[in-house]
């Protein structure tokens, strides 16, 4: 675990709220000059605390407003099968998140598509072609109540 002081945490909170802040704006937000803020940013980037900066899109405005959580159960599981599944999932742009989970299912996928028809096509023509796929359980999102992009620091 990387050691972070209170100033580092303030910088991270500010960036999670708005990654477009300039170094000057960030320095003002944490009551420091720009040079130490810049140095802290570069250190946290080198240490992997800050992995990348991204633009967050509105899925509905780009024709991908149908969100589905899909639990995946494999027919059988070993390291090669898991690695193959994880490699294949990287090929599917509809899958924005994939987690290897414990419990009744092996993986949890977050999928964005245009509508139910497109989801059906995705299941039949893409996900359904993955070797050793056993069963799926889909949960369709009716309304997003809370979505935070950051980590509580």
Image: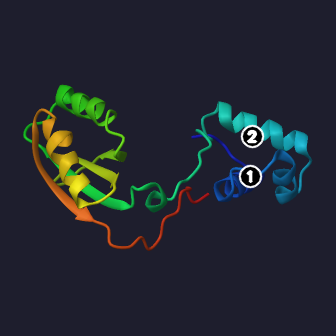
Residue 116 location, quadrant: bottom left
Disc number at residue 41?
A: 2
Percent across and percent down for residue 99 are: 32, 46
Residue 65 location, quadrant: bottom left
Q: Earlier in the sequence, mark 1 or mark 2?
A: 1
Which residue is depicted at the point 19% across and 25% down? 80
Instruction: Tell me, yes or no, if residue 106 can be seen here.
Output: no
Q: Residue furthest top?
A: 80
Which residue is depicted at the point 14% across and 45% down? 124
Query: Across the whole image, how many numbered discs are drawn on residues?
Result: 2
Percent across and percent down for residue 77 are: 13, 36
Disc number at residue 11?
A: 1
Q: Is residue 148 rendered to the left or right of residue 45?
A: left
Instruction: Tell me, yes or no, if residue 103 can be seen here.
Output: yes
Q: Is residue 148 above or below residue 87?
A: below
Q: Is residue 112 above or below residue 125?
A: below
* In contact (CB < 8 Å): disc 1 and disc 2: yes
Percent across and percent down for residue 136 are: 14, 52
Which residue is depicted at the point 52% across and 62% down? 148
Name the foreground residue: 123 vs 136. Answer: 123
Which residue is depicted at the point 89% across and 51% down? 32
Percent across and percent down for residue 147 are: 48, 65
Could you tell me which quadrant the C terminus lies in?
Answer: bottom right
């Amino acid at each position: 675990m990387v050691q972070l002081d209170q100033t580092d945490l303030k910088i991270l909170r500010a960036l999670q709220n708005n990654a477009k802040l300039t170094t000057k704006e960030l320095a003002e937000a944490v009551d420091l000059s720009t040079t130490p803020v810049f140095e802290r940013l570069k250190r946290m980037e080198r240490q992997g605390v800050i992995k990348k900066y991204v633009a967050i899109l509105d899925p509905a405005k780009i024709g991908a407003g149908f969100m589905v959580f899909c639990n995946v159960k494999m027919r059988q599981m070993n390291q090669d099968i898991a690695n193959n599944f994880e490699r294949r999932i990287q090929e599917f742009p509809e899958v924005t998140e994939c987690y290897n989970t414990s419990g009744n299912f092996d993986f949890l996928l977050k999928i964005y598509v245009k509508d139910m028809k497109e989801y059906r096509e995705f299941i039949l023509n893409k996900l359904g072609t993955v070797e050793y796929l056993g069963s799926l359980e889909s949960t369709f999102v009716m309304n997003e109540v809370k979505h935070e992009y950051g980590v509580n620091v």
